[in-house]
Amino acid sequence: MTHRCGSVAIIGRPNVGKSTLLNRFLGQKIAAVSPKPETTRDRLLGILTLPGAQVLFHDTPGIYRGAKTLLAKHQVQVAREALAEANAVLVMTDAVTGLTDKDRDLFRLLPQRRGQSADEKISVFLAMNKVDRARKPQILPQIEEALRLYPFREIFPISALNGENISPLLISLVAALPEGPAAYSADQVTDRPLRVLAQEMIREKALLFTQEEVPHSVAVLVEEWREGTRGAKLYVRATVYVERDSQKGILIGKNGDLLKKVGEASRREIEKLSGRPVFLDLWVKVAKNWRRDTIMLKRLGYA
Ligand SMILES: Nc1nc2c(ncn2[C@@H]2O[C@H](COP(=O)(O)OP(=O)(O)OP(=O)(O)O)[C@@H](O)[C@H]2O)c(=O)[nH]1
Ligand SMILES: [Mg+2]
């Protein structure tokens, strides 16, 4: 039997559901998901091992034009690199909002197919997500417009949230991958250490419980990660960075209530990831304008 292995870049404008889909494919949550745009800031590898194939999914930050801060430029760069390196590309749009100018801009970045050139080898699929909330008559015109703009190999209306149409999509993606042996062991889900996934879960909760400009100003660093001995809790000390004193106040909240909520919710996620009880020691610090600061971006892993 042939065995396939290759990478699939999941690409799309912010907030269409790329990370939700990655988690859905893996059947496990490794990527942060939130209703705020620009949740994903870095490429995240999710490894799906099947009986006849291994799919290396690359979740990417949302692509858009006019990125201003160093962090935002990094995000767009990361997504473009993943797009350039993938064996197959899965573009995602939002069926509820329909195609927007940001989607149309993104279609222009996709590999152009000219005759039998090398680019022909890259299959580009489109997933129109969130169909659980879209009206059926809305979808067909979107498919027609998408096909006028780009020769997608196949288009799938899906719901990353409830799993609708995910299996046929996965079958087509696997068929588009090159033949080859598995690149990772069957039990490996990502190449990132647990502590990095834990940082993402803490950031997800900080995003969830804050509004306006605060989510964009949040970064998380795990400073200490100590395995408990003989059934004792895993000790995790992490710092939530914000850009201004006022944001620090917001994140801590009255009597520390908000930070407590963030801490409890993220502790539960880290316990699921690590499979053991966790003691999470959460701190908030100000790093002035870190999104424009090269050194800070490096420390936070965004460079
Ligand atoms: N109704 C519905 N909501 C969805 C679906 N998929 C994702 N969402 C929601 O859409 C929001 C954004 O989801 P994410 O997975 O974080 O989107 P993303 O494309 O990774 O966003 P960025 O990382 O910011 O680019 C979240 O609130 C999700 O719960 C879906 O199929 N249906
Ligand atoms: Mg994301």
Image (spheres, rainbow, N blue to C red):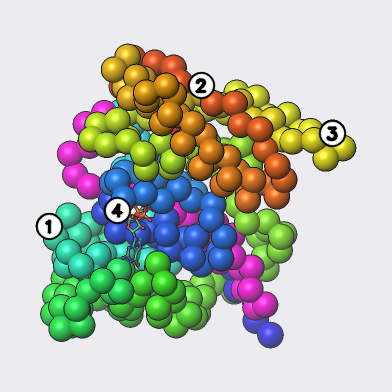
Give residue 293's quadrant in the image.
Answer: top left
In the image, 172 versus 5, the foreground residue is 172
The residue indicated by pointer 4 is 15
x%, y% of residue 222?
A: 57, 28
CA separation, marks 1 and 4? 15 Å
Q: Secondary structure at mark 2?
A: strand
Respond yes or no on whether mark 3 lies under 8 Å from ligand 2: no
The residue indicated by pointer 2 is 283
Q: Secondary structure at mark 3?
A: loop
Q: In the image, is residue 29 above or below residue 76?
A: below
| Quadrant, the C terminus | top left
The residue indicated by pointer 3 is 229
Q: Say which amino acid is labelled 1.
A: Asp
Q: In the image, is residue 69 above or below residue 99?
A: above
x%, y% of residue 92?
A: 31, 64
Q: Say which amino acid is labelled 3.
A: Thr
The residue indicated by pointer 1 is 101
Instruction: Give the residues in magenta.
Output: 45-69
Sooner in the amino-acid sequence: mark 2 or mark 3: 3
